[in-house]
Image: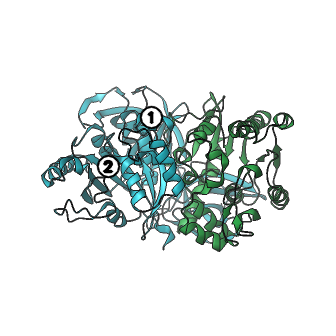
Amino acid sequence: MEDSETLKFVIVGHIDHGKSTLIGRLFFDTHSLPPDKIEEVKRASEGSADGRIEFAFLMDHLREEREQGITIDTAQTFFKTPKREYVIIDAPGHVAFVKNMITGASQAEAALLIVDVVEGVAEQTKRHANLLSMLGLDQIIVVINKMDSVGYQQDRFNQIKRDVGEFFHDVGLTTNYYIPTSALKGDNVASHSDLMDWYKGPTILESLDLLVNRVSPEDKSLIFPIQDVYKISGERIAVGRVEAGWIEKDMEVEILPDRVKTTIKSIEKFNEDKNRAVAGESIGVTTEDPIFLQRGNVLCVEGKEPTITKSFEANLIWLSNEAFDVNERIKLRLATQETSGDVNLIKRRIDSSSLEVLEENASIIKNLEIGDIVFETKSPITLTKFNDIQELGRFVLVRGNDVVAGGIIT
Amino acid sequence: MDHLSKLESNSIYIIREAYNQFQKVGTLWSIGKDSTTLLWLIRKAFFGKIPFPVIHIDTGYKFKEIYQFRDEYTKKWNLELIVHRNEKAISEGMGPDKSKLECCTELKTNALKSAIDKYGFRALYLGIRRDEHGIRAKERVFSPRDQDFEWDYKNQPPELWDQYKSKADAEEHMRIHPLLGWTELDIWQYIKKESIPVVRLYFAKDGKRFRSIGCEPCVEPIQSEADTIDKIIEELKTTTISERSGRAQDKESDYMMQKLRALGYM
């Protein structure tokens, strides 16, 4: 098996539509559970309403989660099929925990969006779909769950499928599959259900194996943000992670934002003799000229520079109970760059679930609202559009010491 | 890039990020396979020399092999080692024969608290992994602890795109978890790839080996014939027994780990 194949996916959806149950079912049906874990869950399930095993307890480990039957925080766990290994990110479906959902989803390469066939498209179904779109996720499997409670009827499935399809169209999201399931009973999770012969598509397990891994953007031109500079035996080594493209010894590079040029003298990695590094690698470099490098500088290739600017347009999701005001001075972090700035203009503020435009030319953005904004920074910042290079096209806003918003550059 | 190189690069990124953001940092070394792998990665991140102290919270109940290994590699890797014990509790006879919750709290959590007080650490690296325990699966990479050492697991900060929280004034210290995304199998495959030395208790002797090590009275070996790294990797690919099944503190009650961690346990 190819080791690099591990794939991270997130399970999202409205509260009680069955995310944690689905994960439990996936583990159970693929025999991924150690006996002592099954025992622990069985013990914790005793006294539950109908005496059945609570699959959800496998992920919901906090006492509060088990007692209240909801997922509070995102969790990650591991499971494998004969094809590859997976990291499952479980994200909470309650509106109070959207910041935890985003934390989970921002680390995923694909998503399973689960919708209860009875309740249909609900508030968090829409909000999560919208956020997946914003986070740039382009591999989505829609799971239409609880088919057992509608007698496995195809027309009920088709109706929800249509509703989801319409909303996906509105937020610009495409889906790989719609799968009718009962996570509780195990239909179409690990094996095909005899109760739904009208469905000819893949099971959840099969659909996962059809997803593709996200690759680091090696084919783009160099983006190397400097993380820190160390002095090691008299030599100054600038360290960081190559975020796009590749870098090698004797390469001519340009240092942004000041556009100073130099040549790479060496690529440094402890106990390794290395002349070249590619996107995804944490390395160090030394330069031919004694130039002053510092955290926040970005190394690139002349003629293929990202944008250097003090003003940019972005979409941001606000994640704090205390609203954001156009006049507020706030810290911005983008890759290893940090600067302060403010929102010059909130063109529109949007409800992240209904997509309704709440106000044009707004002066504030409230919790869980999306702002279509123009941001102005104090000092020049190096960036690209999110669709060009994600690593240099996304940022967070920090108030005090807390991350209060995530944004993508449009 | 293969899977292990990707994990390595991301861990090194996290290690360097925390070192850049916090003034006074240290790393906890239990001498087990995970924290030893963490030391290995920290050495790589700083080109061979760890620029901060390595802390061993010693309960006095560790295996002799652990102490031997500690002393040997402290010298070889030129570590700035701090050994810290809750001498008061030890002299008053605290031990696992009392309640295990109490013993872990006194000899580990409270010992760590006093080490932090004494040396003024603002951030500590720990080698915990998400796949070890359901509670650890919910951890963040940068995880704040307050003055009472408590983990506010119901209100964790968002973590997006490798942008981590900085420490607020009200917070006592930040826990840094560079190995959070690694599995037990990843650790062993990396140990093999890099030839990282580990305590020999992990290798089978007379049909038994330790899968997880800690205090001698509170860990049990598992049945195993795996006496080489290759055999351990093979065993892990097929086993259905969970890693910490031999750890007493995970067993006392279902929420013991949550209680311990909320109180500041590692």
Q: What colour denotes chain B? A: green
Q: Residue B178, position in %: x, y?
A: 61, 52
State whether residue A252 appears in this view: no
- Asked if residue B218 lies left or right of residue A338, the reply is right
Q: Mark 2 or mark 1: name the one nearer the start of the chain.
A: 1
Quick one: which residue is furthest to the left in this view? A155
Instruction: Mark 1: give few (<14), some (14-19) or many (20+) Cα within 10 Å.
Output: few
Taking depth in this image into account, of A328 and B56 the one nearest to the observer is: B56
Mark sitting on residue A133: 2
**With respect to residue A41, does A175 lie above or below?**
below
Rendered residue at 68%/43% (across/down): B124
* In the image: residue B207, left or right of residue B4: right
Instruction: Please report, as a chain letter, where disc 2 is located.
Output: A
- Chain whose colour in the figure is cyan: A
Toward the viewer: A369 or A253?
A369
Q: Is residue B107 left or right of residue B182?
A: right
> Which secondary structure, mark 2?
helix
Residue A327, percent from left and from top? 42, 25
Amino acid at the residue labelled 1: Glu
Name the residue at 34% across, 67% down: A210
Q: Which residue is mark 1?
A: A67
**Amino acid under label 2?**
Ser
